[in-house]
């Protein structure tokens, strides 16, 4: 029943109108949910767990230091996420922008510098991927969950975490969410995302 | 439920059975992809305007046929993904045809040649560019002992700076033998236009016409500039005062399929019908003032009954066409390949052009084209006369070196020309190509060239739509293979061998073009721009407008008698080697997208078939799918019979495109090539081969094979899948 009301309500919300009768019930429900997730009631982060493998990368990039210790915004490096379907691996020049000066004594930075001096980018291994017939787009998801809601951009990592997990606790990324169709569709259902096949399968 | 299954239940049962079957297979249980397997490499230094995942669009020019349509290529992460029409192109106005759509498939084709090949001990073996270059230097370099006129170029239609370079190369080796071969061409139409109007490529304005009478001109498929004409046609059709199309031909073309009235005509008698119509028009009050003085007398011989007997078109239909011509002005009358490809093709096309003169279409729907001022860049238009001329000259051992590019004459030449034997006798044959085609397999040196999407080029379409243009072809991505070279780069390097003073300073074709464009600007293309600005603007626009000199049409009409092709009891049918948009003359048979897109009329995919009229077939006891043998004096082919009333009873149509003996995995060994059994007769006036004049006989073999067709059947078997309503009923419901 509760699920039914939630689904109905948020579906309506996606079209910009509340069902007048269920509004009161929904508001109470929403308030209780807000306290549990840390998110406003209009968003239902997807659940689901995937037991990802540990992927060996050319350089063990420490996401935790960048995000948790140094408080760097995800979109500072993955700058294409808000403009494109892909978030993009940052250009090596971007890494070197800081690491010409910072932490040059660390072996990982020295390895990075070697690549840079050779004029090469590291061959990273892809961790998060969807099949070629799925047209996932970062841009639309950031628009919906961050910009359209006036969600504070400095907290964007919590939105990224919907699909990528708590990257701030990882060194190299590890896949912790299923990223399969049922999982995507479940979240679309809960949050009023499009349900048409061709939205993702073009 | 009764014991009977209806269609719906049957499908349901099939669906269940299907699921059960699939469950037994190794179906993946999840769509999640493996982690840590695929590489992902970032940019080292990002380009400012590049966003991964977002396409950047560049302008270029399509080379799938010679119409010269402008295209926009979408490039993402350094790879071309899609090609669409250039919205500003005066030729195609943002549209492309299916061949243009398949441009990317020619580029990513798995059968591209990836390194030079040299003939050693009778077979072609991969070689390095150093070796290829050394061989070129030995045969064509400054120390090569070349007597005058011993080098020949054999190309398709070629224009722009590629053509200029070929001309310059021939000059540098003391020769002037440039043969341009195209099986699908409109050269007889051009010859007639030049003689009658003093304009070889008059501009046609279908959109201004209230009636198009087309004698087999497949103007939306293969004729001159198909995408351009398709646009005009659609404007004509959607105008408030809607124009009409009457198509007269022996085998229905794609254009014929769109006609308001389709008339089947006995092959080779289109000119007679045109003269008959001229006679009808004069008799019915259309002025003959624009015709020569003896016109009335000459035309009087073509009375309705005589014309009807010769053409097989009923007098009622002739009258109907005549009335339409008289009442619907302005009109435009066109002639296509089947009219041109007769021994009296010139006279027949003249008769058709005569109708335009009589009806006052010149200046209304047939307009003068501008004279292109840069002659050395104008299209060298290919034809079949050059095919025959080359075969003859090569057989007489006139050449030491032959350079081939953009043509596959070994495939397109009728067997009776013996072009393969002639070519084999040439001591050194260089073929510059993307694919291992039939001609490349006979070469002594094969040079792998870049694809259209990797190479530079400039193109001047023979048919200039609207203002005169040079279309620009630019690389949309880095070459896929490091051992291929641009065509222009190869010619520049050969020129540098002979004429280092003039060409040695150019590193490549790009360098040459930059230099040329800096001077082109001075020639009056655009003022007040720096060379860099002019170059960048040109690339961005994909074309340069060139001011052409206006031309005036001076009409010189003439009338010649036209005889019907003689009957031949031994060879009762006429062979129609029909070209269609898609495989075209066979050059696109290696593109699976075009192989699998069905023939527009027969809806057949992936193979050859012979279209034969049911009445003709029943006389010989031929049924649908029977493998029949089609023999002319020049040879025989076997194909599956396809019974259809979209072909005249006296004709048998075998589409062009298949029958490759080489040309990669998708084309090789598939179907038959009707050109091989064409008898080498020529149109007397122009020397073009009479490709549509070959008489054949048909015999049965004992085989019957399935013809793969889209939909498989022309009827709906009473299921009413597509509901229709008669025009009368529709008018009633609209209250009209």
Image (cartoon, coloured by chain):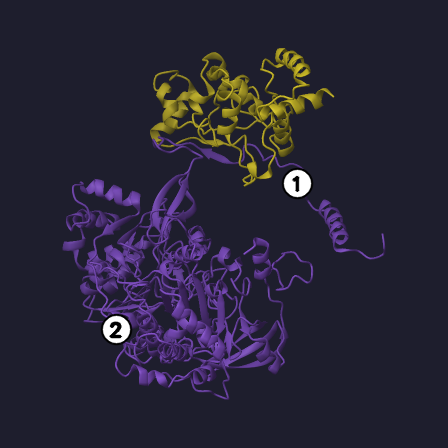
Chain colours: A yellow, B purple
Q: Image quadrant of residue A163?
A: top right
Q: Specify few, some or many for label 2: CA neighbours under 10 Å numbering under 14, 14-19, or 20 or more.
A: some
Say if B681 sits above or below B533 in the image: below
Relative placement, left or right, of B620 versus B519 is right
Relative placement, left or right, of B158 versus A159 is left
Say if A93 sits above or below B685 in the image: above
Q: Chain of mark 1?
A: B
Q: Which residue is mark 2?
A: B195
Nearer-N-terminus badge (1/2): 1
Element assignment for label 2 = helix
Q: Nearer the viewer, residue A115 or B574?
A: B574
Q: Nearer the viewer, mark 1 or mark 2?
A: 2
Residue occupying the point 58% across, 35% down: B34
Q: Image quadrant of residue B465?
A: bottom left
Residue occupying the point 49% across, 80% down: B312
Element assignment for label 1 = loop
């Amino acid at each position: 029943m509760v699920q039914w009301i939630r689904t109905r309500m948020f579906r309506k919300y996606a079209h910009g109108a509340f069902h007048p009768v269920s509004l009161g019930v929904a508001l109470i429900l929403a308030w209780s949910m807000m306290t549990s997730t840390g998110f406003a009631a209009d968003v239902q982060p997807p659940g689901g767990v995937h037991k990802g493998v540990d992927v060996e990368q050319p350089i063990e990039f420490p996401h935790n230091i960048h995000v948790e210790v140094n408080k760097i915004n995800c979109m500072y490096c993955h700058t294409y996420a808000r403009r494109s379907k892909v978030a993009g691996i940052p250009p090596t020049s971007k890494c070197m922008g800081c690491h010409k000066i910072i932490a040059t004594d660390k072996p990982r930075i020295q390895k990075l510098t070697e690549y840079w001096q050779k004029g090469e980018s590291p061959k990273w291994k892809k961790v998060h991927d969807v099949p070629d017939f799925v047209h996932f787009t970062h841009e639309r998801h950031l628009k919906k969950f961050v910009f359209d809601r006036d969600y504070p951009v400095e907290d964007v990592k919590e939105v990224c975490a919907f699909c990528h997990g708590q990257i701030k606790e990882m060194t190299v990324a590890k896949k912790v969410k299923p990223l399969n169709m049922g999982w995507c569709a479940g979240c679309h259902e809960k949050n009023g995302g499009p349900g048409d096949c061709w939205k993702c399968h073009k | 439920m009764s014991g009977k299954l209806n269609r719906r239940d049957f499908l349901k049962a099939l669906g269940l059975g299907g699921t059960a079957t699939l469950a037994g297979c190794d179906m993946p249980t999840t769509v999640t992809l493996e982690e840590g397997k695929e590489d992902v490499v970032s940019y080292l230094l990002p380009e400012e305007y590049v966003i991964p995942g977002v396409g950047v669009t560049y302008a270029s020019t399509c080379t799938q046929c010679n119409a010269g349509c402008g295209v926009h290529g979408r490039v993402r992460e350094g790879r071309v993904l899609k090609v669409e029409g250039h919205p500003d192109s005066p030729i195609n106005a943002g549209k492309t045809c299916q061949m243009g759509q398949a441009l990317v498939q020619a580029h990513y084709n798995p059968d591209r040649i990836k390194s030079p090949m040299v003939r050693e001990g009778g077979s072609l073996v991969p070689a390095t560019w150093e070796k290829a270059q050394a061989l070129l230097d030995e045969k064509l370099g400054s120390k090569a002992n070349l007597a005058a006129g011993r080098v020949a170029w054999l190309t398709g239609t070629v224009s722009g700076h590629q053509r200029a370079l070929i001309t310059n190369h021939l000059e540098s080796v003391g020769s002037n033998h440039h043969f341009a071969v195209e099986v699908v061409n409109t050269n007889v139409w051009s010859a007639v236009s030049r003689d009658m109007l003093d304009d070889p490529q008059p501009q046609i304005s279908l959109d201004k016409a209230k009636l198009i009478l087309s004698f087999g001109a497949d103007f939306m498929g293969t004729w001159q500039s198909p995408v351009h004409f398709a646009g005009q046609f659609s404007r004509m059709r959607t105008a408030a005062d809607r124009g009409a199309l009457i198509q007269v031909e022996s085998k229905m073309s794609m254009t014929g399929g769109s006609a308001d009235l389709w008339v089947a005509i006995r092959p080779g008698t289109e000119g007679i019908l045109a003269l008959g119509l001229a006679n009808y028009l004069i008799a019915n009050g259309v002025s003959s003032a624009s015709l020569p003085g003896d016109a009335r007398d000459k035309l009087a011989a073509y009375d309705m009954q005589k014309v009807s007997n010769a053409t097989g078109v009923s007098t009622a239909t002739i009258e109907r066409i005549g009335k339409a011509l008289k009442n619907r002005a302005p009109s435009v009358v066109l002639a296509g390949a089947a009219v041109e490809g007769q021994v009296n093709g010139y006279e027949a096309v003249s008769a058709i052009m005569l109708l335009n003169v009589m009806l006052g279409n010149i200046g209304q729907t047939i307009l003068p084209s501008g004279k292109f001022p840069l002659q050395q860049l104008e299209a060298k238009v290919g034809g079949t006369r050059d095919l025959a001329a080359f075969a003859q000259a090569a057989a007489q051992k006139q050449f030491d070196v032959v350079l081939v590019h953009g043509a596959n004459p070994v495939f397109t030449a009728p067997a009776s020309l013996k072009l393969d034997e002639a070519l084999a006798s040439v001591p050194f044959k260089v073929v510059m190509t993307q694919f291992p085609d039939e001609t490349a397999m006979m070469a002594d040196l094969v040079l792998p060239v870049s694809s259209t999407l990797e190479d530079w080029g400039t193109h001047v379409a023979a048919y200039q739509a609207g203002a005169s243009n040079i279309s620009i072809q630019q690389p949309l991505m880095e070459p896929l293979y490091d051992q291929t070279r641009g065509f222009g780069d190869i010619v520049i390097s050969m020129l540098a061998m002979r004429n280092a003073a003039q060409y040695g300073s150019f590193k490549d074709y790009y360098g040459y073009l930059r230099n040329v464009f800096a001077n082109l600007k001075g020639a009056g293309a655009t003022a007040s721009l720096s060379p860099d600005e002019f170059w960048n603007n040109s690339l961005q626009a994909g074309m340069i407008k060139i001011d052409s000199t206006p031309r005036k049409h001076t009409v010189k009409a003439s009338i010649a008698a036209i005889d019907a092709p003689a009957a031949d009891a031994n060879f009762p049918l006429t062979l129609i080697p029909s070209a269609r948009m898609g495989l075209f003359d066979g050059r696109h048979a290696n593109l699976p997208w075009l192989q699998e897109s069905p023939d527009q009329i027969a809806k057949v995919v992936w193979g050859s078939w012979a279209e034969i009229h049911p009445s003709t077939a029943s006389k010989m006891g031929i049924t649908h799918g029977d493998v029949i043998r089609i023999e002319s004096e020049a040879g025989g082919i076997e194909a599956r019979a396809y019974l259809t009333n979209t072909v005249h009873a006296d004709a048998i149509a075998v589409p062009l495109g298949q029958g490759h003996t080489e040309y990669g995995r998708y084309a090789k060994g598939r179907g038959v090539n009707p050109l091989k059994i064409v008898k080498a007769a020529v149109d007397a006036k122009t020397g073009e081969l009479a490709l549509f004049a070959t008489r054949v006989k048909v015999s049965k073999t004992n085989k019957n094979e399935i013809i793969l067709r889209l939909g498989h059947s022309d009827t709906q078997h009473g299921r009413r899948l597509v509901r229709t309503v008669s025009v009368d009923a529709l008018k009633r419901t609209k209250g009209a």
